[in-house]
Amino acid sequence: MGIKFGVVVFPGSNCDHDAYYSLKKVLGYDVSFLWHKNTSLQNCDVIILPGGFSYGDYLRTGSIARFSPIMNSVIEFANSGGYLIGICNGFQILLEAGLLPGVMLKNKSLQFVCKDVYLSTENYNTIFTKEIPDKEVLKVPVAHGEGNYFADEDTLKDLVKNNRIVFKYTSGSGKVDEENNPNGSVMNIAGIINEKGNVLGMMPHPERSCNSVLGKTDGALIFKSLANSILN
């Protein structure tokens, strides 16, 4: 289909095959696995940092994976305008690598959360959201223990001012409130982009919401938005 995705595999990744399967078998894109010890990105148009527990999260989520050999190439790729998505643990790695601002804290409940959540799209003008219908609430699963996004006041002001908050946790009707915040994230933030708009980090798992057999397809809109933006 004219676009190639690369899924980075770290020790402890457990959503790499989910991403590969959804992108290749369900959506029909060209996809390659990228082993973390290699430095080549194999001419991929989009890099995916998948969810899981890279290096067992033994030190701090994403903090060791950030120093994997491939990350120098990923950082250079992103800084030169390459398209990059960090999902769950991948989002945590993006924060550790300084490609996105803020940090992840333990969930407010101090419990692992694994369930479907609802998301509102806060910015429809990104390359990741152009295919999402206006005001449509997305249903996408989360699965994390440290998804409580936090940033200082100046960073939050910048995210708001420059429309860099892409997704927020909501109710099924799109209401943003504490009750529908699964982890305590500040401002119900579920996903953000960088200044250039080519790097997306999000805690929910769109790759687990691409297949009609599972009764969930909303996540496919994110990958289709990106692919169509590149191809068009």
Image (spheres, rainbow, N blue to C red):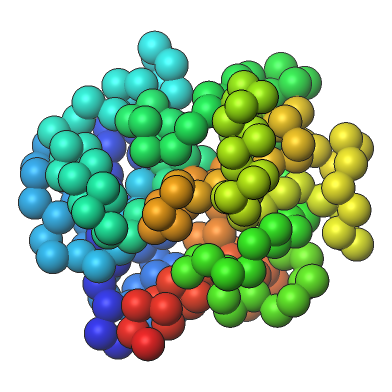
Q: Residue at x 64, y 75 (%)?
A: 132
Q: x, y (%) of residue 53?
A: 42, 30
Please indicate whether residue 47 sits to the left or right of residue 68 in the image: right
Residue 213, how many percent across, how many down?
A: 61, 75
78 versus 221 height, above or below: above
Residue 111 visible in image: no
Residue drawn at 35 percent across, 54 percent down = 84
> In this view of the protein, which residue sits in the foreground, 198 or 61?
198
Q: Is residue 83 visible?
A: yes
Residue 199 placement (x, y as % from top left): 41, 52
Look at the picture and state if 41 lies above or below 91. Answer: below
In percent of width and height, residue 148 lies at: 65, 28
Residue at point 35%, 77% (across, down): 230
Residue in the image at 57% along x and 75% along y: 130
Name the quadrant of the N terminus. bottom left
Tell me where residue 23 sits by quadrant.
Answer: bottom left
Q: Quadrant of the C terminus?
A: bottom left
Lateral position of residue 145 relative to residue 24, left or right: right
Is residue 219 positioned above or below 80 on the image?
A: below
